Image: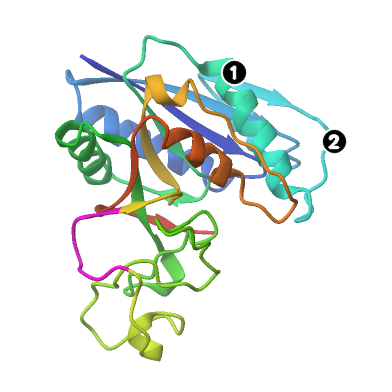
Amino acid sequence: MIKILITTLVRNNEQWLPIFYSEVDKLKEEFKNKIEFTIFIYENDSIDSTKSLLKGDFFSHNYGHPGDMVSRTRRLAFYRNNLKELSSSSEYDFVLMVDSNILFSPSALQSLLGTLDTHEDVAMACSHGLVQTSLPCHFFYDTFATITPDGQKCGQFTNVVECAYPGPYHDRHCHHAHGSPPLNGGATGLVELNSCFGGFVLIRNEVYMKCEWGITNPSDCEHWEFCSQVRKHGKIVLDRGAKVLWSE
């Protein structure tokens, strides 16, 4: 049986955390007798009811950390590395990293599993994260974490992949709305990138255990360093068949 560790960071996520547990229950039901899931949640500094909603395996601590944007990625690197230190084990086959406020489904995980199963040279498969408020447009939301194979760091509204929605309504930043072509055409398939995340990521456990998050400058994304280490062990791809929603 395949063993998957599911990890997530939460802070003031009282609305999303019950949804997360419900979505995980759907994964357990869909992959019953095929996959054994373990959940580990890392919570810090919540002032809403998030702490009272935690169950199972979790870490919870009041650091007294601020919620400012200047120190955000440095703090996230610390939290992610600490979570990894607390939860890592060689017993797992994969680690599924889920960002808070992401809505996901068994089909998204199935797509990521299929990608890693059929492409042995891929170390980490990332979802095509959509913006809930932009639907039905398929604008990819996690551009901050994205670096192209030629080293281009994507801006907030970079069209990393083609939007496959054929209808008339699109996010005003979508390439269909402003006429500029996306960096990667085609509605399906894999896109290899130097750095990517997308909010719902499946990584081979042996690679996960060897890599760490970090930043050099406050304006850096913490995933850039993590992904640079991941690529020493295999490719990073965006799987356009793995659709999830960012709901914040």
Label 1 Cα crowd, 10 Å radius (few <14 / some 14-19 / many 20+): few
Magenta part, dominant SS: loop
Q: Residue at label 2?
A: 64
Kind of residue sitting beneath label 2: Gly
Q: Residue at x 57, y 41 (%)?
A: 225
Q: Residue at x 61, y 44 (%)?
A: 222
In which quadrant of the rendered image does the C terminus lie?
Answer: bottom right
Asked if residue 234 lies left or right of residue 216, the reply is left
In the rendered image, residue 148, in percent from the top left (x then y), is placed at 42, 59
* Residue 187 falls inside the magenta stretch: yes
Q: Secondary structure at mark 2?
A: loop
Asked if residue 69 lies left or right of residue 160, the reply is right
In the rendered image, residue 81, in percent from the top left (x then y), is placed at 62, 28
Q: Residue at x 45, y 48 (%)?
A: 197
Q: Which residues are magenta?
A: 184-191
Q: Residue at label 1?
A: 85
Up the image or down, 51 lies above or below 134; here it is above
